[in-house]
Amino acid sequence: MKRFTVLLLFLGGIFSALWAEVRLPAIFSDNMVLQQRTRVNLWGKASPGERVHVLPSWRRTPLVTEADAEGRWRLQVPTPKACRNQQIRIWEKDTLYINNVLIGEVWLCSGQSNMEFPVCKHPDVYWQTGMENAEEELRDADYPELRLFRMEPQLSETEELDDCKGRWVSCKPSELYDFSAIAFVFGRRLHTALRLPVGIIQCTWGGTHAESWTKMSVMQHDSLYAPVLAKFKEYHQAHKHPAVCWNGMVAPILGFTLKGNIWYQAESNWPRAEAYEQVFTNLINSWRKEWKQPDMPFYFMQVAPHVDLPPLLREAQLNVWQSGLKNLGMATVPDAGDSLDIHPRNKRIAGERLALWALAKQYDHPVACCGPLFHKLKVQGDKLILTFKYAKQGLMTPNDAPVEGFVVAGSDGRFYPAKAVIRGSRVEVSSPQVSHPVAVRYGWGHFFRANLYNKEGLPAFPFRSDQWKLSHN
């Protein structure tokens, strides 16, 4: 009995020592990037009531906080302008170090499968066919100051998790096999354009709807979500549960200080396309609130044309962008859709176009970030004269080809293919079958071919000037 008691005391001492160690979530680890010129959040666990010291290499004196009754601690660390080869020392009773830290620009890349879609082909996952020209993309993919953090997918139906699995790595070909193609292209463009360290966090799960990424408290008392919540127990696939990605993937990194977020999701919301405008707006507002970054940039991709995706889904996304929320932008890829593949392989233009938004709006780079956006129409006899925003330099089609994608209708609401002629930064549309046109649509359908661009080479956004019901499609 005496030996048994001694053994218990010995084991108790070991467990006590382990508990005494400062512990950090996976997002704080060697090779990470912290956002420059701000106060970044740092948190972890330690012995309840114990003082935790944090000393970054760019400071002379440590920052000190105290772990609460549950052993949780959190503090803010002022960061300098972009720099390399930094270290953070953290100690309570024992000491740990975070090495090879960069100070630069940090972006979150989140959403469903089109954001998850990897650089390289997976022979055992049918839809992960790899981005176009993957071998060429990998040839110059060695960027020591572009750091990548890929969260391993994890779901939680009932509680918010406090940690995830993943690691920070330097960008090189061997690390891109599973990494998001769009996130890689986006990060590479920022890194090479800014000539600064860039950190990219991938937080994705294919097949998930927006409600999977929304905090439960936002949804549980709102009738907008009643159809989804009512089916909660009917979902046989875990990734279809409301809040399951918020709990398992967003909550563990919530508060990691970001410059902004890029988002590619909506395909799984097509059965409730009419509700997506408010659902997505609520997601954006709740993320900004929970992150305590009320103006956090949020740039997102409009879903590509596909046989299963109704035009109302793209229109809902357009309405969110045009709603007046600050630091919001939408890129579009009508020229990269695939009628039969909801995962078009040309991810380079998607990543590049999202990067243009960040470069133009967050870093004041002199680049165009937005394609032509329908502004208004004027009836002129048997023609409609259309004007567009973001087309000051004029409109064009590739190789001066005839304009495709327009249809017009009279007061009966019947649409017919239209001839479209570019006049500088305007478009004239008409149809011999419509003598008195009143409405126009462009790129309006599940899948379509459309080829209107501005002179900067960015495609026009699909639109309709009318608000007739879907029976008129």
Image (tube, grey):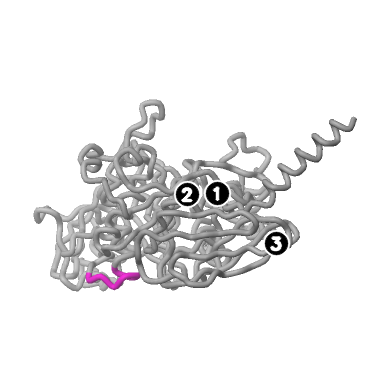
Q: Return the residue found at the far top.
A: 124
Q: Amino acid at mark 1?
A: Met
Magenta range is 360-366
| Residue wearing tag 1 | 249
Q: Is residue 131 above or below residue 146?
A: above
Horizontal side of 333 relative to 303 (left or right) equals left
Horizontal side of 62 relative to 343 (left or right) equals right
Task: Give the spatial CA distance, label 1 vs label 3.
Answer: 29 Å
Front-most of residues 446 and 80: 80
Front-most of residues 404 and 318: 318
Q: Which mark is residue 50?
A: 3
Asked which quadrant contains residue 108, the reply is bottom left
Q: Residue at x 61, y 54 (%)?
A: 94
Does 395 appear in magenta?
no
Question: Is residue 401 something that shows in the picture?
Answer: yes
Whole-percent x, y for residue 457 in the image? 18, 60
Front-most of residues 24 and 165: 24
| Residue wearing tag 2 | 203
Task: Give the spatial CA distance, label 3 vs label 2.
Answer: 33 Å
Whole-percent x, y for residue 36 in the image? 40, 68
